[in-house]
């Protein structure tokens, strides 16, 4: 038995309690979690914005130590530190064949499997494949990657989603070039990773936008050169900060129609807007045909930062070791399993950066 935070049904409150976690079967790995990040996607699973089989143990951004492996596992062994990869590519579908592993058709196939049971026999599924909101989890071998040398195990949890997404949005999707101006909407966990990544890319002006004045110092610490409090005049203020033209690149980390529209309006003619935030089907964004022609802007969606974790983790590790990427500074709340509902409330209210569930395991 291990303690875990699970979702009994869509729209219900998260419950913390004991679950019966089986030993790893063939091709599976059992991990003792060191830490798990509380991501907005977890909140989206609770309210039905994103649909997964329920009841489910949530949590998809985590790192820990391998405690046991099933038959046939060769890539890791007990005692290894690993980062969880919630969206493993199958290698066989059309997207994988094109090298677009972040769009793998089968990445979430494992979310429907039986992961564990409640003491009363209720079946639990593994949320987004990895069920990181638990003291221990069992995952498929392709859902783990070695923690890079020199990266503390607790901090490494953030590599599983926020950092790969934020870094990839800048370097793979928007392809920010040295000297370009970048505006980032939303200074949460992913937004903080975007700000740091824009700085790494050599961006010139880096403008952070958020609804909370309390995020100003956090944004500047992450690399923002300017901070704008979100309002009806946000696009106008950004144009004023960029010589009257607008930013070269806007990266939206909120997932709201109004914010996406403002991000697009904040870029110059020919500018690029990348949408990272996950919104619901009720969030409709509209454009007229003439403005699309006149402004010549590009609007693109971004899944998992267009990242390939196998390729990108070593790159991120080098930035961390060199001091260019600071994982710990993204964490504003270090909590326990029972505190996750409160972290959801703070996230909904736009407070803080990343909340990190820590399980008391010594850092690597």
Image (cartoon, rainbow, N blue to C red):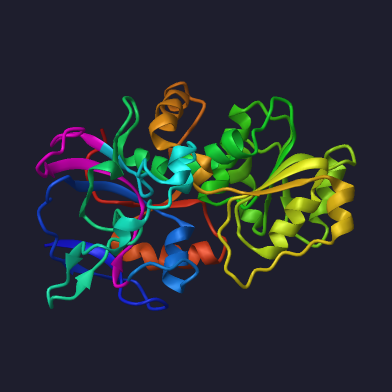
Q: Quadrant of the C terminus?
A: top left
Q: Over which residues does the magenta segment extend?
A: 54-81
Q: Quadrant of the N terminus?
A: bottom left
Along the line of sight, which residue is nearer the eye, 28 or 148? 28
Q: Is residue 59 above or below residue 91?
A: below
Relative side of 228 to 44, left or right: right
Q: So how many labels did they put on this image?
A: 0
Q: Residue at x 61, y 60 (%)?
A: 255
Residue 296, percent from left and from top: 83, 45
Relative side of 73 to 215, left or right: left
Q: Residue at x 58, y 64 (%)?
A: 279
Residue 28, percent from left and from top: 17, 47
Residue 92, percent from left and from top: 37, 43
The quarter holding residue 145 reads: top left
Q: Residue at x 12, y 47 (%)?
A: 26
Whether residue 162 is visible, yes or no, is no
Q: Is residue 86 above or below residue 283?
A: above
In the rendered image, residue 135 lying in the magenta stretch gets the answer no
Relative side of 62 to 297, left or right: left
Residue 320, percent from left and from top: 44, 27
Q: Is residue 214 above or below residue 166?
A: below
Along the line of sight, which residue is nearer the eye, 195 or 41? 41
In the rendered image, residue 56 lying in the magenta stretch gets the answer yes
Whether residue 139 is visible, yes or no, is yes
Q: Residue at x 47, y 68 (%)?
A: 345
Along the line of sight, which residue is nearer the eye, 78 or 156? 78
């Amino acid at each position: 038995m291990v303690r875990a935070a699970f979702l009994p049904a869509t729209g219900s409150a998260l419950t913390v309690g004991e679950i019966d976690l089986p030993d790893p079967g063939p091709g599976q790995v059992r991990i003792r979690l060191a830490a798990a990040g509380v991501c907005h996607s977890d909140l989206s699973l609770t309210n039905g914005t994103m649909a997964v089989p329920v009841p489910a143990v949530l949590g998809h951004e985590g790192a820990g130590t391998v405690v046991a492996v099933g038959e046939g596992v060769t890539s890791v062994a007990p005692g290894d530190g690993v980062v969880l990869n919630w969206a493993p590519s199958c290698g066989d579908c059309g997207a994988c064949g094109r090298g677009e592993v972040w769009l793998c058709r089968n990445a979430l196939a494992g979310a429907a499997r039986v992961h564990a049971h409640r003491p009363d026999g209720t079946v639990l599924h593994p949320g987004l494949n990895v069920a990181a909101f638990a003291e221990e989890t069992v995952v498929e071998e392709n859902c783990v990657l070695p923690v890079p040398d020199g990266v503390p195990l607790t901090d490494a949890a953030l590599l599983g989603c926020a950092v790969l997404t934020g870094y990839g949005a800048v370097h793979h999707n928007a392809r920010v070039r040295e000297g370009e101006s970048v505006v980032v909407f939303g200074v949460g966990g992913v937004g903080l990773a975007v700000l740091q990544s824009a700085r790494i890319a050599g961006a010139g002006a880096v403008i952070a936008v958020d609804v909370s004045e309390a995020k100003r110092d956090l944004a500047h610490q992450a690399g923002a050169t300017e901070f704008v409090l979100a309002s009806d005049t946000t696009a106008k203020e950004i144009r004023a900060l960029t010589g009257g033209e607008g930013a070269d690149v806007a990266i939206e980390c909120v997932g709201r129609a109004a914010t996406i529209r403002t991000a697009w309006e904040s870029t110059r003619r020919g500018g690029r807007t990348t949408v990272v935030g996950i919104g619901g089907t009720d969030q409709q964004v509209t454009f007229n045909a003439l403005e699309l022609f006149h402004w010549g802007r590009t609007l693109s969606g971004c899944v998992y930062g267009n990242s390939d974790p196998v390729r990108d983790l070593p790159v991120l590790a080098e930035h961390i070791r060199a001091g260019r990427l600071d994982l710990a500074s993204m964490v504003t709340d270090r909590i326990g399993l029972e505190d996750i509902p409160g972290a959801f409330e703070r996230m909904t209210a736009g407070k803080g950066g990343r909340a990190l569930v820590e399980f008391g395991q010594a850092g690597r």
